[in-house]
Image: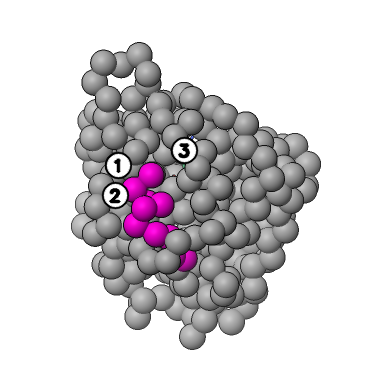
Amino acid sequence: NLTACSSKYVLSQVHPMWQGPLAVPGGDRQSPIDIVVRMSVFDSELKPLVNDYDPDTCQQIWNNGYSFLVEYDDTTDKSTLKGGPLQDKFRLCQFHFHWGESNAWGSEHTVDRRLFPAELHLVHWNADKYSLFEEAVMEDNGLAVIGVFLKVGKRHEGLQKLVDALPTIRHKDSVVEFNRFDPACLLPSNTDDYWTYHGSLTTPPLTESVTWIIMKQHIEVSHDQLAVFRSLLFTSAEEDVQKSMVNNFRVQQPLCGRTVRSSFS
Ligand SMILES: COc1ccc(C)cc1NC(=O)Nc1ccc2c(c1)[B-](O)(O)OC2
Ligand SMILES: [Zn+2]
């Protein structure tokens, strides 16, 4: 729908979590999107991704009232991402997931309209250009986010350590120490095949600062592991009505003439 692209301000969908429309300045590169495979353009210049994560930089896991975040110490270059479509070196700051109340939906991006039960986002910021995540999140080319689709299948051994910590952060704003988790274990075996496009955060402030790198290959987690995600709560311990943390995804946004490039033909 071109109207959503040409207007100076686009009203993002009225999202249950955000109580009403959100005006986003100049919203013509919003995320997530549907990746139409046959419309993506193979770019032979795209390099393999180079991720170099140090599990010792893992610090804590917390429930922010919308997802759960595993946060990393990003004060040094110990956990970095470069290569792929990126010109600069990016530092890992956190990863989180989006999921549905059922296995039928939950991802933010889709591939030829196909929904996955969940999607992992590994968030990095441009440490060559900025000195803080808070700065980079407001700037063009400030963030690089790796998206990985989750499918329900065999149990993911690496994920289990994280799943076991979730009951200790059931409520919004709860935090626990979380150490020595290697996020590389959540990447698919093949990270050379991906789609990439310029987009935005999918939650406020919805800034258009993200180079998205969406993996073609998904990872598998078990039904029971995903069920523990759904045992989290949007609400804090004080609230008298507890709401289960499910469907924490944004609806697909208009492509507005953007090209999605693929690293594979
Ligand atoms: C209230 O939220 C904030 C307050 C202050 C600052 C500096 C940033 C944020 N939000 C933020 O970083 N969101 C955010 C960051 C990265 C990603 C996403 C959301 B996603 O689209 O889900 O995947 C990648
Ligand atoms: Zn996300």
Across and down, in percent, residue 241 comes to 24, 21
Task: Using the image, determine if residue 178 lies above or below residue 235.
Answer: below
Q: Is mark 2 within 8 Å of ligand 2?
A: no
Q: Earlier in the sequence, mark 2 or mark 1?
A: 2
Amino acid type indicated by mark 1: Val
Across and down, in percent, residue 82 comes to 69, 61
Q: Which residue is mark 3?
A: 166
Q: Is mark 3 within 8 Å of ligand 2?
A: no
Q: Earlier in the sequence, mark 1 or mark 3?
A: 3
Left-right relation of 147 to 178: left
Q: Which residue is mark 1?
A: 246
Q: Nearer the viewer, residue 249 or 38?
A: 249
Q: CA distance from mark 2 to mark 3?
A: 17 Å
Q: CA distance from mark 2 to mark 1?
A: 5 Å
Reply yes or no: does residue 221 show up in magenta.
Answer: yes
How is the model colour-coded? Answer: one colour
Q: Residues within 10 Å of mark 3 (few under 14, many from 20)?
A: many
Name the chief secondary structure element in magenta. helix
Reply yes or no: does residue 238 show up in magenta.
Answer: no
Q: Nearer the viewer, residue 175 or 228?
A: 228
Residue appearing at x 48%, y 25% in the figure: 174
Amino acid type indicated by mark 2: Gly
Q: Nearer the viewer's eye, disc 2 or disc 3?
A: 3
Corner quadrant of residue 13: top left
Circles 2 and 3, Cβ within 8 Å, touching? The answer is: no
Residue appearing at x 74%, y 44% in the figure: 56
Magenta residues, start to end: 219-228
Circles 2 and 1, Cβ within 8 Å, touching? The answer is: yes
Q: Which residue is mark 2?
A: 100
Badge number at residue 41 = none
